[in-house]
Image: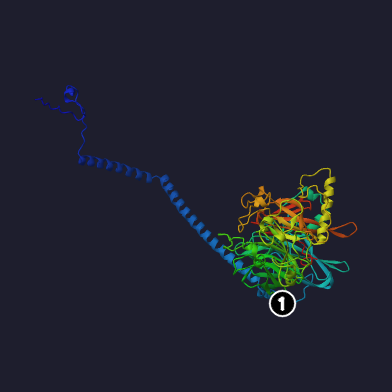
Amino acid sequence: MADTHSSPARTADGRDPRKAAGRNPSHVAVVPDPGTRAAGTGQAFLRAHDIRTRQRKDMAEKPRYRAFKWIITLTVIAMIGVLGIWTTRQYYRAKNSLAATTVLTDRIKKIYTLDYQDQAQQKIDSYKKSRRYTPGNMLVLANPYGTNTTSLYTYFETDSPAKVSYTVSTPEDRSYPAFTRSAFQKQIYQTSHEFSVIGLIPAAKNIVTYTVTYEDGHTDIQKFTYVTGDLWGSAPVRLKKTVTARFRETDKGIRAGLARGLFAVFGLGTNSRDYVYLYDADGILRAEFPMMNNHGKNFSFHDGLMYYVSDFNQISAMDSRGKLVSIFNIPSIYQINSAHTFDSQGNLLLIASDKSQLDTNNLIVKVSSVTGTATEYINFSTLLNDYRKTTRRPLSTDNDLRWNWLMLDSIQYVPGGSVIVSSQETSTVMKIRLPDSAASPASSASGASSGDSTPGSTSADAAGTAASQPSITYFLGPHQIWDATVYSDYLYRKSEDFSTHAGQHSVEQLDDGDANSWISEYNSLRRKKHTAEASDGTSQPSGTGEGAELQPLGDGQHLVYMFNNNYGYSPTNTAVSWPGMVPGVNTVSQGDLSRYKSRFYIYRVDENSGTYTLASSFDIPYSPRYSNAQMIPVPQSSTSGDTSHTMLVLANTAQQHTWGIYSPQGDELVRFTASGISRTDSVYCYTFTGFYFS
C-alpha cells in the first residue's frame, strides 16, 4: 500500500513556512478605525477653514482689495451695458434699414404712375401761373418728376429769343471737373426756356452757372447754388479711369467727340429696385435714374422721347424735362426680358415670356407707342419647334424650372422688315423676317435657303404666307446645333476657317454708312501701323492679322458685330461638346475670370452667297454671361469744316464690372472700372443730342 503524505501549508505569498523560519518578520501597517479617521479629518478641516476665514477678513479690510473688487464689478456691469446697447442698435438699424428699403421701393413704384407725374405737373403749372420767371429769377426745382435724383428742373422766359447753356461746378471740391452743356430747345433761339439740368455731384455743394445768349450776341449770366443729397443707390461717384498712351496720341477731335457722350450703366437690381447711372468721359457720375428691379438694357429715342423698360411688364417714355409722358403697362401674363427696339412704324418690339407657359425668353411682343396695346408678334416655340423638341428641360435652374431652350438676349430692327436676334443658348445669330413684311426674292445661292420661308414649305407657299407669319432669313452659329434639324439649310457657311462665336450678346447690324466708315478707318489705322517705327506696346492684335485691306460692302453684304463671350454652355442641350464645336471656347463661369478672354467680333455677311467671314476681332476681358458691345460713331471736324465720323468700339465686360473704348483695330484707348457695382449688365454711350442737349 502506498504511503499517503499531506503537503505542508504555505504562506500567503506562496512561500514554504519552513524555509521562511529564522528570517525577520514583515512590517504590518495598522489602519485606524473608520470612525476615528473621519473625526480627525473633520477637525483638520475646521482648523483650515478658520484660518482661511481669518485671511479673507484681513484681506477684505485692505483698501487695495476693496478697490480691485469694485473695478471688477464695474467692468462686468459696463460690458453688459455695452453689449445691450450694441444689440439694441443693431436691431433698430436692421429695422430702420428694412423700413427705409420698403419706403424707397414704394416711392419708386409711385413715381412710375401717371398720377404721380400729373400731380408733379400740376405743382409746376401752379408755380408758372403765380408769376413771370426771368433769367434773374428762374424757377428751379429739384427732381420734381422723381426720375433723376441729381437733376434740376429749370424754367424762365426772355424778352427776346435766346439759347441757354449751363456749367455745373463744385467749388468746395475742385477734383470734380466742370460739366458744361447746351440745353436742348426745339428752336436754337426762343423766348420760353424749360429743360432739365443734369450733371450735379451728389452730396455736394453745386453751383450751376446759366449762360443766356441772345441773337445779337450779348449774354446774361446767372448763378444758382444747390446742395444735393445722397444718392438713392450705392454706386461710386467716381470710377477708376485708365488712359493708355495710344489714347493720348489719338486725334484731339476724336477725344473731344468722345467727351460729348455719357455712359449709361445698367446694373443689377437689389431690394426690389434698381438704378441706371450716367457717367461722363472722366468717369464722374452725372445722373441717377431710379427704377424697379427689372430695368432695361438700353435706351431708345423716338419722336423726342426716351423709352426704356422700367419694370417686368412696364415701358416708360420720358421727355427732356424728366417727365414720364407715357407709361405702358402690358398684360401681366407677359414678362419683359428688357431688350427692345423700334420698328419702322414706331412700334416697340420686346423680347418677352408668357408666364403661363414653361418656355421663357421665346417671344417677341409688339407694343404700340401710341396706344400701348401689346400683342404677341412672334412665338419662337412655334417657329423653331423642330429644334425645341430635341432639347431638355433642366431638372434645376435659377428660373423656377422654366424651359429656357432659346434664351433670346438682344433684338435689333433692320430696315426692310426684319429683326436680328441673339440666341445665347444656341450661340446663334438669327435674322427673321417679320410678319406683314413683303416677301423677299428667292436666293439663288448654293447652300442658302430658297428665299425667306417656313421650314417644310415650298417657295410658292412662302410667298403666299410671308405676309402673315414670320420666316427665317439666315442663321450664324455652330452647325452641330442645327445639322439634325429642318433648319440646317438656313445656316450660312463660313467662307474661311475661324472659331465661331459662343454665348454672344448684343448682336447688331451696322447700317451701310457706318459700316463703310468703319472699314475706311480700319484700313487707315492698318496702314499707319505698318509704317510706324515702333509700337508703344498697348496694341492688341486684330483677328484679321496681316491680311489684305477690307473691301467696301457690296450688294447684299453687311457687317454684324457682337460681344463674343466665348463661353460654351447649354443646359438644355447637353449632347453637344462645346470644345469640339468651337476651338478655344471657355467653359468657366466662376472664380478668377481674368485668366480668360472674350472677344469682339465683326462678321461680313453675304446674303447673296449664303456665307459669312470674320472681318475683324480682338481680345477683351472675359465675361461668361451678360455684357455688350457698341460701335460708337464719334463726330470729328476736318480742316475744311466738314464733319465726319470715326467709329470706336465700346466693350463692356459685365462680370468684371469694367468697360473699355477701342480703336477699330483693337487698340485699347481708355478703360473704366466700376468697383462699387456688382456687375454692369450693359453699358451704352449716348450723346443725348436732341434730348437733354442741343
The residue drawn where x is 62% and y is 57% is 573
The secondary structure type at the circle numbered 1 is helix
- Residue 470 % position (x, y): 71, 68
Image check: 639 left or right of 307?
right
- Of all residues, the one furthest to the left in this rendering is 1
Q: Name the side, left or right, on which 470 lies relative to 391.
A: right
Which residue does the numbered mark 1 point to in the structure image? 126
Determine whether, in the image, residue 323 is placed left or right of residue 211: left
566 lies above or below 407: above
Q: Quadrant of residue 54?
A: top left
The one of 421 and 144 positioned closer to us in this rendering: 421
On the image, the x and y values in percent for residue 686 come to: 76, 62
Q: How is the image coloured?
A: rainbow
Q: Nearer the viewer, residue 343 or 380?
A: 380
For residue 264, say whether it is visible.
no
* Front-most of residues 662 and 413: 413
Q: Amino acid at mark 1?
A: Ser
Dot 1: within a 10 Å radius of its alpha carbon, few (fewer than 14), some, or many (20 or more) residues? few
The C terminus: image quadrant: bottom right
Answer yes or no: is residue 56 visible.
yes
| Residue 602 screen position, x and y as percent | 76, 55
The outermost residue toward the top is 22
Q: Residue furthest right?
A: 640
Which quarter of the image is occupied by the N terminus? Answer: top left
The image quadrant that residue 198 belongs to is bottom right
Which of these two is toward me, 261 or 56?
A: 261
Number of numbered tags placed on the structure image: 1
Horizontal and vertical percent position of residue 147: 69, 68
